[in-house]
């Protein structure tokens, strides 16, 4: 097979460089399924990997991109045949295995998800890991008995990919939402996605008590750090706070009081190593009862492999709202 373009990342603890290279299938990591990639996406994790701002790659070099969608061109697995439309998200892409920023990808068969009913290939990548993470967070909230009548759900980092889909999906299910954002020009956008209330990030009172006055029934937090602590300490009894991001810091201080006095639950979400059965269940829901209402509005940009470095920098500088679709 002829050479094809791929956005490849070389990274060690001191330096990171990345760019377009011409590869062949034999240059890619091993796997039973070869996919002609049609679309990928840009996630916060992709930007960190591509710029070296965090040590995401566990081996080097690797093709970037933690998401991909396309058509099977070769398969050594009886589960997939030529022409099948499929997707892969997380599962080690661009961490331990070549990812989706290339015309072709070769992956293990047990990572591959058939295209869900109700979604196109492009829609799966507008959703991507960000939307999948939002849906997985909501799935966990529901499993933990988060009821609509309990009160509002706070979504921090609301104008980003995860936050945008969290607002959209929670609104679709009937939950009241409080969208917290540091982007002054994103308020109208968030109301259009269904936010019940939009609050500027600096208006959230962090407080210093081991318990604060209860103000919400739960949260989906993209920030971490002091914000995550504040969300837990001000949660209503038996509330659920889902931690999905660390844009504001990896460390936070908490006492045991919110857990043993109010019964608050702090839930963690890891989309990369989500069990495959659960992964397929979430994607099935994204094509059905969790199908986003404003998917076209959340996709704010389309780009290609050549422009990825520019997109990474803008994303890390909070200059992008919603999602960026990558056409391969």
Image (cartoon, rainbow, N blue to C red):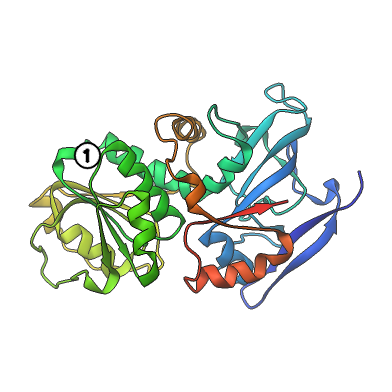
Which picture quadrant has residue 50? bottom right
Which image quarter is the N terminus in?
Answer: top right
Q: Tell me where residue 45 appears, x and y as whole percent.
A: 53, 60
Which picture quadrant has residue 105? top right
Residue at x 56%, y 67% (from the top left corner): 48
Task: Tell me, yes or no, if residue 188 can be seen here.
Answer: yes
Residue at x 47%, y 41% (from the top left corner): 274
Residue farthest to the bottom?
A: 14
Q: Tell me where residue 237 appears, x and y as whole percent.
A: 11, 48
Residue farthest to the top?
A: 78
- State whether residue 122 is above or below residue 52: above
Q: Answer with left or right where residue 243 lies relative to residue 23.
A: left
Numbered disc 1: secondary structure: loop
Q: Answer with left or right where residue 323 lies relative to residue 192.
A: right
Q: Tell me where residue 132 appears, x and y as whole percent.
A: 47, 44
Viewer-side residue, 227 vs 169: 169
Q: Disc 1 designates what residue?
A: 146
Residue farthest to the right?
A: 2
Viewer-side residue, 65 vs 216: 216
Q: Answer with left or right where residue 301 lies relative to residue 305.
A: left
Q: Tell me where residue 258 appears, x and y as whole percent.
A: 13, 56
Viewer-side residue, 16 vs 129: 129
Which picture quadrant has residue 173? top left
């Amino acid at each position: 097979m002829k050479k094809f373009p791929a956005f490849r990342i070389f990274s060690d603890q001191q330096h990171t460089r990345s760019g377009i290279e011409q590869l062949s299938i034999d240059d890619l990591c091993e796997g039973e399924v070869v996919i002609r990639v049609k679309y990928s996406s840009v996630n916060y994790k992709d930007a960190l990997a591509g710029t070296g701002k965090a040590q995401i790659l566990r081996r080097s070099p690797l093709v970037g991109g933690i998401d991909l969608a396309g058509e099977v061109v070769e398969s050594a697995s009886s589960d997939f045949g030529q022409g099948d439309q499929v997707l892969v998200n997380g599962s080690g892409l661009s961490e331990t295995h070549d990812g989706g920023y290339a015309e072709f990808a070769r992956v293990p068969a047990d990572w591959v998800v058939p295209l869900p009913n109700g979604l196109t290939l492009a829609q799966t990548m507008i959703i991507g890991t960000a939307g999948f993470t939002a849906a997985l967070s909501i799935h966990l909230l529901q499993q933990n008995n988060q009821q609509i009548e309990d009160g509002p759900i706070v979504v921090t980092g609301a104008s980003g990919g995860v936050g945008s889909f969290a607002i959209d999906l929670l609104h679709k299910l009937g939950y009241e939402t409080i969208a917290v954002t540091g982007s002054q020009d994103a308020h109208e956008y968030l109301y259009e996605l269904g936010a019940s209330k939009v609050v500027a990030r600096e208006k959230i009172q962090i407080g210093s008590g081991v318990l604060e006055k209860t103000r919400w029934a739960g949260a989906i937090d993209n920030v971490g750090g002091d914000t995550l602590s504040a969300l837990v300490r001000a949660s209503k009894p038996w509330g659920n706070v889902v931690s999905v991001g660390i844009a504001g810091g990896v460390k936070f201080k908490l006492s045991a009081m919110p857990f043993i006095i109010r019964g608050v639950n702090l839930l963690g979400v890891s989309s990369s190593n989500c069990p495959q059965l659960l992964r397929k269940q979430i994607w099935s829901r994204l094509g059905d009862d969790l199908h986003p209402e404003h998917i076209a509005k959340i996709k704010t940009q389309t780009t290609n492999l050549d422009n990825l470095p520019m997109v990474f920098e803008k994303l890390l500088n909070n200059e992008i709202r919603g999602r960026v679709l990558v056409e391969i």
